[in-house]
């Protein structure tokens, strides 16, 4: 190790790329967009093992009670200061899936950054909501929990194996308000679904979660980001058609690449004058955003850099459609 020669630290791109083992094009993009210190901090975080965070199922009891139950099963946790729902695992004697608390549906494993997407959508009991690209149901089940399992969540996903896991998660968490649909969103007929709130968790480059997918840094390219941004723009237009007049639309990704985030939203808004960005800073009053990030949220978009708050890198935008909800259940 002592014979390793690194590039000159004065050449930030070359040095950081070699020191943190990340492709030069990615380091160059982050240096341009975020500057040297945030980039260095992100690169260090993305080479660490991510924390294991549990979302307490509010339908089954308090997180204090969950912590006690987990302690009895050999799992030590600390209550998170980031959100009111989460616990961070600090030690365990067995796998989480083998626990009685898991089988009883007391918790769901989810990063706190991902939880924020649902908090920004702000579900309320009795609403009809739509979760697009729902995957295995992490956000759909959290929507249902925040609605006290009263209302309707249409979870739309392309892949059969993910939908099967989504249904298993709903059963385990004792959730009945989520309906799973196997559909290709790009092939949906206009008017197929309508809701007071729509959450689009768009397919993305995953650059905010590179510590969870160790090989992905070497498999991503600039060209893929350009292709993804076109796909995301198409999905966002379809999602917008599902929003009732007066309803809200949340666009989220687990990347911090501007072409997939701010650029997609800005392009969408330029051609949809019936949508506008909406302040969601008060809805994240529980989360310790710094002044700069809270200002971002007040403008309707927020990019969480990976590791800044010990969370995944995430992007969120909340938009409101003009008009009035007809059924009166809008928050």
Image: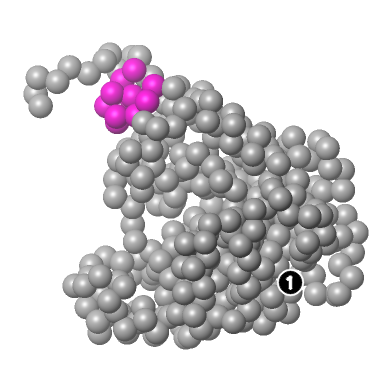
Instruction: Identify which residue is drawn at 59% across, 29% down.
Output: 226
User: Is residue 306 among the parts visible in the rendering?
Assistant: yes
For the stretch drawn in magenta, the main secondary structure is helix
Quick check: is 272 in the magenta stretch?
no
Instruction: Identify which residue is drawn at 52% across, 61% down.
Output: 160
User: Is residue 293 among the parts visible in the rendering?
Assistant: no
* Left-right relation of 142 to 211: right
- Percent across and percent down for residue 204 are 54, 42
Instruction: Indicate the quadrant where residue 292 lies.
Output: top right
Q: How crowded is the residue under tag 1: few (<14 C-alpha within 10 Å), some, or many (20+)?
A: many
What is the quadrant of the C terminus in the image?
bottom right
Coloring applied to the structure = one colour
Instruction: Identify which residue is drawn at 65% across, 50% down.
Output: 251
Look at the numbered disc 1 and give the secondary structure of its residue: strand
* Left-right relation of 94 to 54: left
The residue to which callout 1 is attached is 128
Instruction: Indicate the quadrant where residue 117 lies.
Output: bottom right
- Percent across and percent down for residue 22 are 34, 29
Q: Which of 136 and 291 is in front in this view?
A: 136
Relative vertical location of residue 155 with respect to residue 176 in this rendering, above or below: above
User: What segment carries the magenta color?
Assistant: 14-24
């Amino acid at each position: 190790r002592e014979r390793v020669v690194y590039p000159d630290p004065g050449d930030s791109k070359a040095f950081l790329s070699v020191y943190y083992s990340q492709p030069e094009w990615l380091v160059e993009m982050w240096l341009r967009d975020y500057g040297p210190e945030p980039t260095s901090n992100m690169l260090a975080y993305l080479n660490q093992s991510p924390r294991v965070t549990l979302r307490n199922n509010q339908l089954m009891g308090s997180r204090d009670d969950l912590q006690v139950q987990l302690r009895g099963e050999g799992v030590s946790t600390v209550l998170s200061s980031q959100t009111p729902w989460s616990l961070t695992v600090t030690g365990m004697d067995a796998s989480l899936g083998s626990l009685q608390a898991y089988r009883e549906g007391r918790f769901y494993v989810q990063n706190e950054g991902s939880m924020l997407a649902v908090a920004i959508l702000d579900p309320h009991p009795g609403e009809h909501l739509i979760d697009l690209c729902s995957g295995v149901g992490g956000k759909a089940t959290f929507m249902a929990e925040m609605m006290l399992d009263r209302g309707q969540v249409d979870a739309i996903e392309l892949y059969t194996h993910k939908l099967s896991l989504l249904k298993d998660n709903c059963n385990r968490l004792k959730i009945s308000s989520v309906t799973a649909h196997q559909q290709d969103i790009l092939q949906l007929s206009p008017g197929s679904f309508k809701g007071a709130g729509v959450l689009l968790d768009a397919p993305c480059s995953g650059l905010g979660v590179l510590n969870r997918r160790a090989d992905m840094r070497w498999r991503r390219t600039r060209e893929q980001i350009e292709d993804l941004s076109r796909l995301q723009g198409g999905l966002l237009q379809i999602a917008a058609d599902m929003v009732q007049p007066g309803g809200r639309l949340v666009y989220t990704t687990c990347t911090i690449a501007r072409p997939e985030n701010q650029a997609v939203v800005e392009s969408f808004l330029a051609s949809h004058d019936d949508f506008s960005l909406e302040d969601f800073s008060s809805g994240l009053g529980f989360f310790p955003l710094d002044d700069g990030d809270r200002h971002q949220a007040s403008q309707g978009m927020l990019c969480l850099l990976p590791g800044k708050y010990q969370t995944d890198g995430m992007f969120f935008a909340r938009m409101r459609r003009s008009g009035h909800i007809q059924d009166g259940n809008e928050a």
